[in-house]
Amino acid sequence: MNWPSVIILTLIIAAVVAVIVGEILKKKKGKSSCSCGGACGACPMGNSCHQK
């Protein structure tokens, strides 16, 4: 592998890790990536987004 390939691969891995960590932090704060549009009662994923 040459240096440009290593640098690009490192940037891609860093971006993927940042997205995963961001999603984990959102979930810990009680926010979710669920996009029910505010009508969570009608959303089939309402129980998984807003646990009681």
Image (cartoon, rainbow, N blue to C red):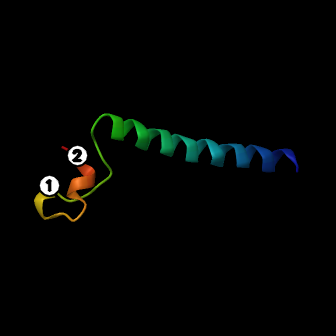
Q: Give coordinates of residue 26: x percent, y percent.
A: 35, 39
Give me the residue at 33% from left, 51% from top.
Answer: 33
Q: Where does label 1 land, which residue? A: 38
Q: Give coordinates of residue 5: x percent, y percent.
A: 79, 50
Q: Is 8 placed left or right of 19 in the picture?
A: right
Give me the residue at 22% from left, 46% from top.
Answer: 51
- Secondary structure under tag 2 reads loop
Q: Quadrant of the C terminus?
A: top left
Q: Give coordinates of residue 20: x percent, y percent.
A: 49, 44
Camera-near label (1 vs 2) is: 2
Which three-letter amino acid code belongs to the residue tagged 1?
Answer: Gly
**Quarter location, residue 34:** bottom left
- Secondary structure under tag 1 reads loop
CA separation, marks 1 and 2? 15 Å
Q: Is 10 placed left or right of 26 in the picture?
A: right
Identify the disc placed on residue 51: 2
Sooner in the amino-acid sequence: mark 1 or mark 2: 1
